[in-house]
Amino acid sequence: MTSAPIVESQESSRGKILPLRILVAHPYITPEIFSFFEKHPQEVSILIDSGAYTYHQKHQRFSVDQYIDFIKGLRVKPWGYFQLDVIGNPEETRTNLYKMLNAGLKPIPIYTRGHEPEEIEELYKVSDVIALGGISGVQGGSHIATYIKNLQPYIAGRKYHCLGLGDARRIANLKPFSTDCTNHLTARRFGRVHLYMGRGEFVAIDRDTFKKKPPQKIIKRIRQLGFDPYHFAKLEAWKGTKLKPRLLLSLYSQWLYQEDMKKRVGVNMFFAEDSANILPDYEILHGLINGHKLNEYL
């Protein structure tokens, strides 16, 4: 059996703080991202996605040979990297996996919803951990549960990654080895922050929340996280997409959730990113995690 090159999450140099985990797809990877990793090797873990879905959406072709060359040329060791899958083509997806294996790589294989579940057995023959795709496309929590339940004869007691799963209750019930989600991106895309209150509970806040005095628990929580709750009463707090406290509050809140899930449930959660321009935000997030104050950056 070939094990995927996963570096188990470690505690950081501060002792009890777990690494900042980021999943970045190939189309969004820049040299600066790896420089960030090299600056903080004990505090940052990078998981690489091939970007097959992004290339598919853009009607662009990205070959397995290009991906193999990219992985072989990495100057840092990532937490792991997924195989190159092909949207809607299980045969070519399988061919790509074995091309990567034959090239001496150890990718995390992807099982896509709709394939025969018996294929999972074949994937575990070449890796200790596999990824379950198609979860984000399943509508409704009960349908997600059914999808995973049907796979239990094949994945029970084994390591698997849930692509695109961020729901606390589902994660706590399933206890996958790892998962990724885009919950934090709602602040960037829609101006809405999922404020983490602890124990898997989130409260959604936006501009309307602050048109009147928000509940005291929201004010208290924002202040606990080192942010000024009165800032969010200003209209400009909810505009723009660059280095705004709103974006940083969303990132910091999601990181606390990820840390909670790791410590309480044992799941490695990752920020799934959709942009190449992420480093300013993550540099500040890293600082906040490691004891710096928000006003040092603004």
Image (cartoon, grey):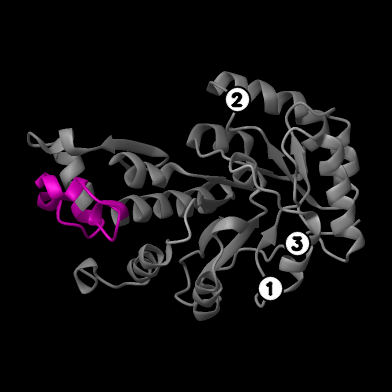
Range of residues picked out in magenta: 223-247
Percent position (x, y) of residue 57?
A: 59, 40
User: Which mark sits nearer the N-terminus, 1 or 2?
Assistant: 1
Q: CA distance from mark 1 to mark 2?
A: 34 Å
Q: Which residue is mark 3?
A: 66
Q: Amino acid at mark 1?
A: Leu
Q: Which residue is mark 1?
A: 74
Percent position (x, y) of residue 248?
A: 31, 57
Q: Amino acid at mark 3?
A: Gln
Which disc, if any, is residue 138?
Answer: 2
User: Which mark sits nearer the N-terminus, 3 or 1?
Assistant: 3
User: Is the Cβ of the residue at disc 3 closer than 8 Å to that at disc 1?
Assistant: no
Is label 3 or label 1 in front?
3
Question: Which residue is at the front of the view, 11 or 140?
Answer: 140
- Residue 133 drawn above or below residue 21: above
Q: Assign the N terminus to one quadrant of the image.
A: bottom right
User: Is the Cβ of the residue at disc 2 closer than 8 Å to that at disc 3?
Assistant: no
Question: Which residue is at the front of the view, 60 or 274?
Answer: 60
Q: Amino acid at mark 2?
A: Val
Q: Give yes or no for residue 135 being in the magenta stretch.
A: no
User: Is the Cβ of the residue at disc 1 closer than 8 Å to that at disc 2?
Assistant: no
Please tell me which residue is depicted at 77% across the width and 54% down the height of the picture. Answer: 63
Q: Is residue 74 left or right of residue 231?
A: right
Q: Label 1: few (<14), some or many (≥20) within 10 Å?
A: few
Look at the numbered disc 1 and give the secondary structure of its residue.
loop
Percent position (x, y) of residue 3?
A: 82, 59
Q: Label 2: few (<14), some or many (≥20) within 10 Å?
A: some
Q: Assign the C terminus to one quadrant of the image.
A: bottom left
Q: Give yes or no for residue 229 being in the magenta stretch.
A: yes
Look at the numbered disc 3 and give the secondary structure of its residue.
helix
